[in-house]
């Protein structure tokens, strides 16, 4: 424990004796413990349910640990679960999501980083007007732009395809990513940029040889932000793709909320946790960088 | 922002080329798309968009549709409760974590992980937990309280609160993180001074710290409100809008009108109303935040 005098307490203050089991500590850690349990509970319930057989689910309650651990629900969720139309499980949706996420992440980050770099270091007249529109665009409810984009995608022949969805993700990732990169590049020492200019480096030369190598942390933040965001997307997936190209979140919803057949809760929960696995892994591995990514949205430009 | 950028000195084509995607997105998708939708909300578009003017007909019909009114009511209830609780919970959590505690990282990690999950996953887990046959209700009844009733997702009167529980679980971590950053940004001398003056901790929070955190509160508010207006996936996954139409929300109304009912005009009118709602929050905020000083960039 750090010394207790750094803490806001009531009454007369002075250096207090360090007591681990003070009433304050019991209350504080007790509360935090209960809260932590509450937040962790759904994850626990998901895992536990997905490892039980259906008879056990019907008998027991959702919190009881499995008496007989079975991985069958996971296998079924992956390859056999039914959506009402087909019974291919989540695997198709998973691979679709992979095929959507990877190009979307690469494309959106490439475009936004170059864009942010242009805005930070090569400002041209009118650049800020477009940037402001872009940032305000981030607040427009997606529903307003849903149909115009349907028309655009139809015109260029990408409606219903994975490519179309990649384009949509690139467009809607642009505001936050551009802001992120612009702010980061602006914070780099300007002398670097000037020195490179004096040495005769051009736009792309400076970008690839100086800016990118110096900005690995922010690229990591952007990748985390985009992978989780795109993987978790549901609305764009359901609007711009068809049954063959549905991303994982849409297939998951179709599997769990399909009205046909007997509800198999263990398979449903296995499917749910499989879908959540990618963002969860990223979250637990990346730690502080994830927090930085979401905080980026809150930092004003 | 530093001011002495070599702005007009280097007129480079590359920078302008690099900005083309941004310009196209800003103009054609964001501005163009929005104007297009607003314009077509005054037309009689059905299966396909058609420029057949009907004035405010779509809006009149919209406000006479029960499903839309229920949607608005739900959004209001959900929005109000979400705002209230997410801020109270988020702030209290941040204040607790800010007490120089041990295991700070672990606790923060656990509270924030729901935010990494999609709304679909969130909705489905809570659909399962709130399932009266297997979930919370059954457990409490198992403890001997036979008459215990807790089936928010099956009771039309309170279903939206079932969604709220899930939404709070998913979103409060974000507010906690932002609030914590705000608390950490406050000068420790403030606390020392308050302690010297004998001001109790809760009073210091309420009267000194929270007012000092105004910018954090405002940005969080904007983030939370825009998130609330967009709520869609959570509803689809958790309740599908049911039971009946008791958990319908505007975003779902838009989707259903456009892509299910082939009633584009209704969808356009409804989404224009959503835009208006967001504008009512974002524009005053933008004026407050950026209006006064022109030298932000």
Image (cartoon, grey):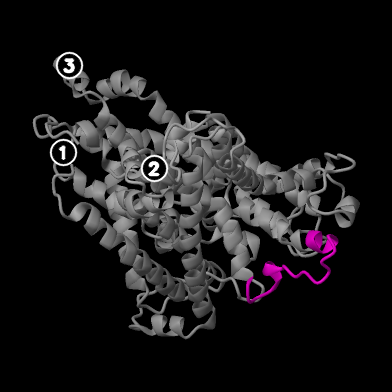
Residue B144, magenta (yes or no): yes
Please give the residue where the numbered disc 3 appears in the rendered image: A195
Mark count: 3
As drawn, A167 above or below B236: above
Image x and y of residue B82, in percent = 50, 62
Q: Name the residue located 14 percent from the left edge and 31 percent from the top edge.
A: B5
Please give the residue where the numbered disc 1 appears in the rendered image: A124
Tell which subunit mark 2 falls on.
B
Quarter residue B224 falls in = bottom left
Q: Name the residue located 19 percent from the left edge and 32 percent from the top edge.
A: A122
Residue B52, label in figure: none
Q: Residues within 10 Å of mark 3 (few under 14, many from 20)?
A: few
Q: Residues within 10 Å of mark 2 (few under 14, many from 20)?
A: many
Q: Nearer the viewer, residue B178 or B198?
A: B198
Q: Nearer the viewer, residue A183 or B81?
A: B81
**What is the magenta segment's predominant secondary structure?**
loop
Please give the residue where the numbered disc 2 appears in the rendered image: B183
């Amino acid at each position: 424990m750090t010394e207790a005098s750094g803490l806001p307490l009531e009454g007369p203050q002075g250096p207090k004796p360090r007591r681990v089991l003070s009433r304050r500590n019991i209350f504080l850690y007790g509360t935090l413990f209960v809260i932590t349990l509450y937040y962790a509970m759904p994850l626990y319930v998901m895992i536990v349910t997905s490892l039980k057989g259906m008879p056990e689910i019907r008998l027991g309650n959702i919190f009881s640990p499995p008496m007989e651990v079975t991985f069958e629900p996971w296998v079924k969720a992956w390859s056999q679960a039914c959506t009402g139309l087909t019974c291919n499980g989540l695997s198709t949706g998973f691979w679709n999501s992979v095929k959507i996420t990877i190009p979307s992440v690469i494309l959106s980050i490439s475009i936004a980083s170059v864009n942010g770099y242009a805005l930070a270091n090569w400002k041209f007249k009118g650049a800020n007007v477009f940037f402001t529109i872009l940032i305000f665009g981030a607040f427009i409810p997606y529903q307003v732009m849903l149909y115009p984009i349907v028309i655009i995608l139809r015109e260029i022949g990408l409606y219903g395809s994975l490519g179309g969805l990649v384009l949509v993700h690139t467009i809607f990732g642009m505001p936050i990513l551009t802001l992120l990169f612009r702010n980061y590049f602006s914070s780099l020492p300007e002398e670097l940029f000037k020195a490179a200019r004096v040495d005769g480096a051009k736009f792309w030369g400076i970008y690839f040889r100086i800016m990118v190598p110096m900005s690995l942390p922010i690229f990591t933040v952007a990748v985390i932000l985009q992978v989780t965001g795109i993987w978790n997307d549901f609305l764009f997936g359901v609007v711009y793709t068809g049954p063959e190209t549905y991303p994982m979140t849409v297939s998951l919803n179709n599997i769990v909320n399909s009205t046909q057949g007997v509800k198999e809760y263990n398979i449903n929960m296995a499917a749910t946790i499989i879908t959540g696995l990618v963002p969860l892994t990223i979250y637990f591995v990346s730690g502080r960088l994830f927090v930085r990514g979401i905080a980026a949205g809150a930092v004003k430009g | 922002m530093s001011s002495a950028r070599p702005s007009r000195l280097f007129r480079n084509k590359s920078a302008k080329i690099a900005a083309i995607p941004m310009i196209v997105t800003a103009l054609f998708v964001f501005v163009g798309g929005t104007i297009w939708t607003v314009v077509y909300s005054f037309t009689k578009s059905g299966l396909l968009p058609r420029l057949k003017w009907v004035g405010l007909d779509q809006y009149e019909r919209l406000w006479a549709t029960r499903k839309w009114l229920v949607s608005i009511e739900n959004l209001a209830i959900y929005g109000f409760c979400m705002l209230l609780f997410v801020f109270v919970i988020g702030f209290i959590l941040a204040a607790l974590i800010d007490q120089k505690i041990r295991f700070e990282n672990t606790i923060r990690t656990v509270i924030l992980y729901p935010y990494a999950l999609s709304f679909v996953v969130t909705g489905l887990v809570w659909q399962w937990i709130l399932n009266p046959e297997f979930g919370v209700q059954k457990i409490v009844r198992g403890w001997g309280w036979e008459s215990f009733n807790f089936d928010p997702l099956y009771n039309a009167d309170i279903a939206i609160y079932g969604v709220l529980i899930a939404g709070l679980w998913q979103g409060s971590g974000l507010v906690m993180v932002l609030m914590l950053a705000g608390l950490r940004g406050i000068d420790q001398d403030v606390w020392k001074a308050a302690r010297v003056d004998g001001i109790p901790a809760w009073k210091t929070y309420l009267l000194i710290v929270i007012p000092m955190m105004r910018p954090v509160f405002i940005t969080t508010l904007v983030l939370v409100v825009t998130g609330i207006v967009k709520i869609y996936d959570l509803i689809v996954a958790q309740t599908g809008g049911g039971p009946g139409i008791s958990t319908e929300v505007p975003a779902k109304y838009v989707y259903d009108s456009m892509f299910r009912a082939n009633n584009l005009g209704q969808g356009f009118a409804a989404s224009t109303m959503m835009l208006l709602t967001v504008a009512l929050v974002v524009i005053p905020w933008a004026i407050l935040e950026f209006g006064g000083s022109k030298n932000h960039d």
